[in-house]
Amino acid sequence: GLVAFSVGHKYKTSRPNDLGARVYGGGFEAEYAEAVLEKAGTMLEEIETLQEEREIKVVQGDEVLWKQPLDPDADITWDPVRGVLRIKQS
């Protein structure tokens, strides 16, 4: 797979000094965009392999009480108020 990002203004050959809008508190839009993209790149590089399947477990102490295989693309959310784990298959 391929992932591509753009920092917009920065590195543009036609106007190399254009860094976009000023950001409240200091800096420019392109600087913040680049920092976010660098972090995303680091996170993507840390992924060793794509998950073919995922497993969810309920663990108490060191004991696994329940486990279930899941689709790697399933969306999992926890509602701490209701104590509900919701699994939405894609």
Image (tube, helix red, strand yellow):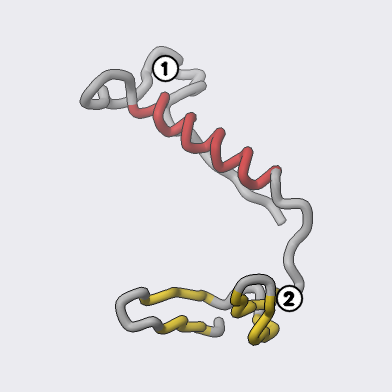
Q: Which residue is mark 2?
A: 53
Picture quarter with the N terminus: bottom right
Among all residues in the image, which is located at the extreme front? 61
Q: Residue at x 27, y 19 (%)?
A: 26
Where residue 85 appears, as percent x and y from the top left, is 46, 81
Q: Which residue is mark 1?
A: 15
Where residue 51 appears, as percent x and y from the top left, is 73, 67
Q: Amino acid at mark 2?
A: Glu
Observer-side mark, 2 or 1, equals 2
**Relative to 2, is 86 above or below?**
below
Q: Residue at x 51, y 19 (%)?
A: 13
Instruction: From the viewer's side, name the closer residue of 59 and 82.
Output: 59
Q: Is residue 3 left or right of residue 85?
A: right
Picture quarter with the C terminus: bottom right
Rate crowding at label 2 as few (under 14), some (14 to 19) or many (20 or more) other CA atoms within 10 Å: few
SS at badge 2: loop
| The quadrant where residue 15 appears | top left
Instruction: From the viewer's side, name the closer residue of 28 and 55.
Output: 55
Among all residues in the image, which is located at the extreme top? 17
Where residue 34 appears, as percent x and y from the top left, is 48, 30
**Relative to 51, is 37 above or below?**
above
